[in-house]
């Protein structure tokens, strides 16, 4: 069975996280990803956050599966010739350099179009056109400028970044969609195009419900936020703690063992349709008919008390036990799973969402697999490449260079 992107060749000039997330996803779908790295140095993450001396870090290995590594000095004249040949031989070039870096190397978009009119040139940038377009951006900067941090955390505390990499990995996912869409359009137009994804834009796209709430705020308080009815609302969307952000109120509640286990909690949603079942399970049957509690509108001002009452029940059950009781009653809930628990979860291993990979110098390690499952396109996770591991293989197989030409490029310092 063929993979979805088999036959598509990616020239991967990405590093750290946002770009590699994108190209790894394309590699999982079968694209041939040629990762271009600096000779002797490689992607900076190879050496960052190392847990084993002199071995590629997990930071690198978990972002660079299903790729081939080619070392190339693109500042060297012979190296530039090789790069020109690679541009002609590939379908997509992906980069997340600082603004203008490829232009300074002598490869602006106009030059790339000359070399290969079918080339799709995809970039991650921190900001789109505007006052900040030349600024460097990292994960947490993107979270802060895209609206996430201002709306995360509790009202009486500072803005908070989230542990999910919505800036880096989130932008990589958006860019992958842009690339696949451009490839689809190229089938009709025959032409490549520029694809640009700004990290600020991607974070905002993932925070769209908060932009929704900013506009609702002009027409009165946000009744599903914990500030209602006793708190105050300013002129911007406030932080809402663990409130659900949807039409159904939710909160994180303590479970048995919370005193010593930082993750002994469950997320509990008081969905209107199952309110009678909630009242039954926590032993407050009188709330089913009581007009003070019987309707969602009546319950809104009392949510803090209602969740505190439900928590008295959840504190008598461990989080999995609570889930087992609530699930058959269709009460929406979910245990707070630690990374340790996620890593050990058998169902995630069975679906390939968590995979064990064997690496020649690191040994076995866990990684995420492809989160997108397709019925007619297999997806497998192969290990990340060692630095320059496939240089000769790519020069011979993709560019058709002879042993003599490769030796010449090596002696010139190009590879």
Image: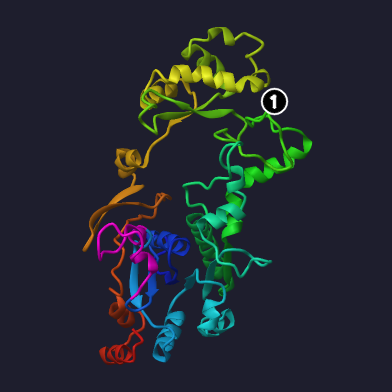
Query: Label 1: how many residues lie within 10 Å, few (<14), some (14-19) or many (20+)?
Result: some
Q: Name which quarter of the figure residue 407 lies in.
A: bottom left
Q: Is residue 43 magenta?
A: yes
Residue placed under numbered mark 1 in the picture: 229
Q: Check the image and report above or below for 145 versus 157.
A: below
Residue 31 shown left or right of residue 251 in the figure: left
Foreground residue among 162 and 328 = 162
Foreground residue among 391 and 74 = 74
Residue 320: give x, y in percent of width and height.
36, 27
Picture residue at 61% right of the left edge, 52% below the top: 204
Q: Quadrant of the N terminus?
A: bottom left
Region in magenta: 41-62
Foreground residue among 269 and 257 = 257
Residue 141: give x, y in percent of width and height.
56, 57
Residue 3 shown left or right of residue 245 in the figure: left
Residue 101 shown left or right of residue 30 in the figure: right
Q: Main secondary structure of the magenta part?
A: loop
Q: Is residue 356 magenta?
A: no
Q: Name which quarter of the figure residue 220 lies in.
A: top right
Q: Check the image and report above or below for 257 versus 178.
A: above
Q: Check the image and report above or below for 208 versus 277.
A: below
């Amino acid at each position: 069975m063929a993979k979805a992107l088999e036959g598509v060749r990616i020239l991967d000039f990405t590093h750290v996280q946002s770009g590699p997330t994108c190209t790894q996803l394309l590699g999982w779908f079968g694209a041939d990803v040629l990762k271009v790295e600096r000779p002797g140095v490689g992607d900076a993450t190879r050496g960052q956050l190392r847990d084993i001396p002199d071995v590629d870090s997990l930071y690198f290995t978990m972002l660079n599966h299903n790729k081939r590594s080619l070392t190339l000095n693109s500042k060297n004249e012979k190296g530039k010739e090789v790069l020109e040949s690679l541009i002609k031989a590939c379908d997509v070039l992906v980069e997340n350099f600082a603004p203008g870096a490829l232009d300074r190397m002598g490869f602006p978009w106009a030059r790339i179009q000359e070399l290969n009119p079918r080339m799709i040139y995809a970039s991650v940038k921190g900001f789109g056109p505007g006052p900040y377009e030349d600024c460097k951006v990292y994960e947490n900067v993107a979270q802060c400028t895209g609206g996430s941090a201002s709306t995360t955390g509790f009202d009486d505390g500072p803005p908070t970044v989230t542990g999910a990499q919505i800036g880096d990995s989130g932008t990589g996912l958006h860019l992958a969609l842009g690339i696949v869409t451009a490839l689809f359009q190229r089938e009709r137009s025959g032409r490549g195009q520029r694809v640009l994804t700004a990290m600020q834009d991607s974070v905002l796209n993932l925070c769209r419900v908060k932009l929704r709430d900013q506009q609702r705020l002009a027409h009165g308080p946000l009744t599903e936020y914990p500030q209602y009815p006793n708190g105050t609302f300013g002129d911007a969307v406030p932080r809402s703690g663990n409130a659900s952000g949807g039409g159904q109120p939710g909160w994180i509640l303590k479970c048995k063992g919370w005193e010593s286990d930082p993750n002994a909690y469950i997320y509990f949603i008081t969905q209107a349709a199952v309110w009678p079942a909630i009242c039954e399970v926590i032993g407050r049957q009188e709330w089913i008919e009581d007009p003070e509690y019987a309707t969602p509108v009546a319950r809104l001002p009392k949510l803090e008390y209602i969740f505190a009452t439900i928590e008295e029940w959840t504190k008598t059950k461990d989080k999995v036990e609570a889930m087992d009781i609530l699930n058959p009653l269709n009460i929406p809930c979910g245990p707070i799973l630690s990374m340790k628990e996620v890593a050990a979860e058998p169902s995630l291993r069975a679906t390939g969402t968590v995979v064990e990979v064997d690496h020649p110098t690191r040994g076995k390690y866990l990684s995420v697999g492809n989160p997108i499952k397709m019925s007619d396109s297999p997806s497998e996770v192969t290990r990340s490449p060692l630095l320059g591991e496939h240089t000769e293989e790519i020069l011979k197989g993709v560019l058709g260079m002879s042993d003599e030409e490769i030796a010449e490029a090596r002696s010139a310092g190009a590879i």
